[in-house]
Image (spheres, helix red, strand yellow):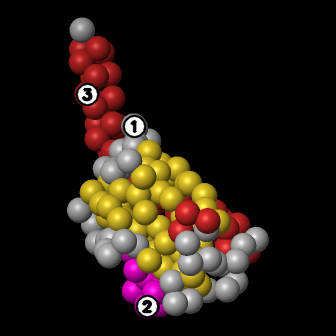
């Protein structure tokens, strides 16, 4: 009986000691997965911009739809906010901002191809749903200059 109690106490102590490391790993993994989504969006934008010419009629513009997944599950930390925003270091640029577990917000710059067109986010940040998939449509239009227009779908 005493062995069982001691075994349980040791197991609880080991679990309690390992939880900070588990939380750190979850946070790091979630940040890496969000970074991978930013890279995927960058590749999609680069593909549209590289092989196309901007046109003034949005219905005729080169476009693609990108599915962005915000990490969920046991291996992911709680994501408080994920949004496509104007890049803080490049006006007219694009960034993916996110906040994990009430920590300070982080921003990942998303490139828009070698032509560096302006970015139109429909008048403000595009908030993405934490804990699921989000579709965004990317169009390459001529809006007084080459512009990547991004809208949330659905």
Using the rendered view, name the quadrant where residue 2 is placed: top left
Image: 2 above or below 114: above
- The reply, left or right, for residue 101 in relation to residue 67 is left
Q: Residue at x 43, y 90 (%)?
A: 91
- Label 1 sits on residue: 74
Can you tell which mark lies on residue 91? 2
Is disc 1 surrounded by few (<14), some (14 to 19) or many (20+) residues within 10 Å? Answer: few
Viewer can see residue 106:
no
Q: Residue at x 51, y 83 (%)?
A: 143
Neighbours of disc 3 within 10 Å: few (<14), some (14-19), many (20+): few
**Observer-nearest of 44 and 130:** 44
Which quadrant, please, contains the N terminus?
top left
Q: Do tag 2 and tag 3 residues touch (Cβ < 8 Å)?
A: no
Of the residues tagged 1 and 2, which is closer to the observer? 2
Q: Residue furthest top?
A: 1
- 20 or 112: which is nearer to us? 112
Residue placed under numbered mark 3 in the picture: 9
Mark found first going from the N terminus, 1 or 3: 3
Query: Label 2 neighbourhood size at 10 Å, few (<14), some (14-19), many (20+)?
Result: few
Q: Compute the Cα span from label 1 to label 2.
A: 37 Å
The spot of residue 100 in percent (x, y) is 32, 59
Q: Which residues are magenta?
A: 85-93
- Residue 36 found in image quarter: bottom right
Residue 115 is at least partly visible in this image: yes
Task: Determine the residue positioned at 67% across, 74% down.
Answer: 49
């Amino acid at each position: 009986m005493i062995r069982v109690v001691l075994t349980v106490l040791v197991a609880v102590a080991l679990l309690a000691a390992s939880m900070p490391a588990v939380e750190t790993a979850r946070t790091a993994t979630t940040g890496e997965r969000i970074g991978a989504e930013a890279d995927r969006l960058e590749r999609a934008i680069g593909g549209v911009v590289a092989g196309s010419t901007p046109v003034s009629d949005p219905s005729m513009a080169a476009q693609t739809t990108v599915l962005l997944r915000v990490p969920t599950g046991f291996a992911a930390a709680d994501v408080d906010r994920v949004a496509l925003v104007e890049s803080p270091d490049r006006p007219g640029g694009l960034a993916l901002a996110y906040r994990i577990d009430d920590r300070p917000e982080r921003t990942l710059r998303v490139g828009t191809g070698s032509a560096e067109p302006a970015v139109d986010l429909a008048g403000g940040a595009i908030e993405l749903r934490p804990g699921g998939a989000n579709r965004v449509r990317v169009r390459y239009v001529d809006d007084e200059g080459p512009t990547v227009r991004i809208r949330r779908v659905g």
